[in-house]
Amino acid sequence: MLSKRIIPCLDVRDGKTTKGIKFQNNIDIGDPVEMARIYYEAGADEIVFYDITASSDRRDIMLEVVRGVAREILIPFSVGGGIRTLADMRAVLLAGAEKVSVNSAAVKNPQIIRDGARAFGSQCVVLGMDVKQVPPSDQIPSGYEIVINGGRTPMGLDALRWAQEAVDLGAGEICLNSIDADGTQTGYELTLTRMISEAVPIPVIASGGAGTPDHIYDVLSRASADAALIASMVHYGTYTIAEIKRYLDSRGIKVRLVW
């Protein structure tokens, strides 16, 4: 059995880690490079960075942050936000990241997934999905819609269909974020996560809503997620990564306990 991964998520805006609720009312909470080092030393399995306004502001990717993080940690990390071209992907990987996450750019130009997979391998290409629940319709039969540009632009695109298409294009992993649950600390969106996890043959990282170790247990067991993204519960010191992992281990979830 593969170990389940615990992955702190650092949303970055103007070079600072920031946190909001449902993609709104963000406040700055720290330096991303320093926070990455702390989480690496605390036992994180990976770290995810998102430049949350790069796409909406049409800015370039945060390469200086990527280089700084690469000097501080020895675990895989992925970077998303502002990645629009194959050259952007290459720049992020050369700066030290192991994976690139494409979200808005992939919806606008799905070919970027195929091009990235061919150039760097599927294992380097993560599809980021920001999803909002809507009434089911002919256009969105699953009842879950893709929203891009940091939660600002609904696309009329069915989340389940898009996940399956991305797999066909060569995505190696999906980071699935529920906008409805984001930052609420009331639990992951289990129905959405289970639906996507059971429909695709690649790993799915659950994102949005973690507030307690119970929430993480639920999404890893009941919703079949391969990894759990966490933010508020560790950013604000409510739990440590070690506490979360010991709890999961006590309930039979296989996690990496030695680092």
Image (cartoon, rainbow, N blue to C red):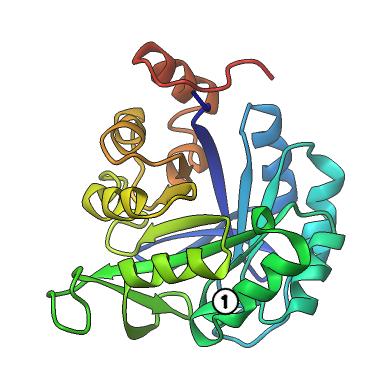
State which quadrant residue 250 falls in. top left
Q: Is residue 89 above or below residue 237?
A: below
Circle 1 residues within 10 Å: few <14, some 14–19, many ≥20: some
Identity of the residue drawn at 31% across and 31% down: 221
Decide if residue 143 is on the left or right side of residue 255. left
Decide if residue 244 is on the left or right side of residue 59. left
Q: Nearer the viewer, residue 129 or 203?
A: 203
Identity of the residue drawn at 82% across and 49% down: 70
Q: Position of residue 210 (x, y in %)?
A: 36, 43
Identity of the residue drawn at 47% across and 45% down: 229
Of the residues shown, which amino acid type is indicated by label 1? Answer: Thr
Determine which residue is flagged by label 1: 53
Identity of the residue drawn at 34% across and 15% down: 251
Q: Position of residue 56 (x, y in %)?
A: 54, 84
Q: Is residue 144 above or below residue 110?
A: above
Q: Nearer the viewer, residue 79 or 185?
A: 79
Decide if residue 54 is on the left or right side of residue 222. right
Whether residue 23 appears in this view of the structure is: no
Q: Residue furthest front?
A: 168
Q: Position of residue 252 (x, y in %)?
A: 37, 15
Q: On the rendered image, what quadrant is the C terminus found in? A: top right
Q: Position of residue 255 (x, y in %)?
A: 51, 22
Whether residue 63 appears in this view of the structure is: yes
State which quadrant residue 142 falls in. bottom left
Q: Nearer the viewer, residue 118 or 219?
A: 118
Q: Is residue 150 above or below residue 174?
A: below
Which element carries disc 1, helix, strand or loop?
A: loop
Number of marks present in the image shown: 1
